[in-house]
Amino acid sequence: MAHHIDRPDDSHAPRHKPNSTAEETSAAGQRFKGKVKEEVGDALDDKQMEEKGRRENQAGHDRQKKNDAV
């Protein structure tokens, strides 16, 4: 697998103005990417990819909890 180029996006730092729809959308995208990686890792029995996805998904979830746009 190409793990050397698959860096997880598991930062909890906001990327847009706080309490904005842009931040909400970005965090939702981070969750989606994480969930896809998690599911693909599970399907391929790739525990490393599955864990990266889990961390990305959680980071996006945490960002959404901090954001008060919706």
Image (cartoon, rainbow, N blue to C red):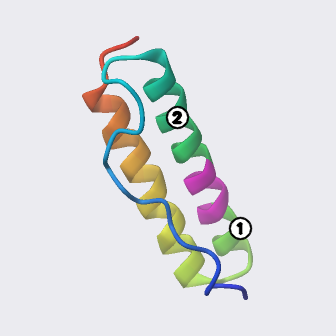
Task: Please provide percent x and percent y for residue 19.
Answer: 32, 18
**In the rendered image, which residue does mark 2 sit on?**
26
How dense is the environment of label 1, judged by Cα within 10 Å: few (below 14), some, or many (20 and up)?
some
Q: Is residue 66 left or right of residue 52?
A: left
Task: Please provide percent x and percent y for residue 65.
Answer: 30, 30
Q: How many marks?
A: 2
Precedes in sequence: disc 1 or disc 2: 2
Residue 40's mark? 1
Q: CA distance from mark 1 to mark 2?
A: 21 Å
**Which stretch did the figure color magenta?**
33-38
What secondary structure predominates along the stretch shown in magenta?
A: helix
Which residue is rendered at x = 31% and y = 24% of the image?
18
Which amino acid is tagged 1?
Val
Q: Quadrant of residue 47?
A: bottom right
- Quarter that holds the C terminus: top left
Q: Is residue 8 left or right of residue 37?
A: left
- Quarter that holds the N terminus: bottom right
Q: In the displayed image of the protein, which residue is found farthest to the top?
A: 70
Which amino acid is tagged 2?
Ser
How dense is the environment of label 2, judged by Cα within 10 Å: few (below 14), some, or many (20 and up)?
some
Q: Is residue 61 above or below residue 67?
A: below
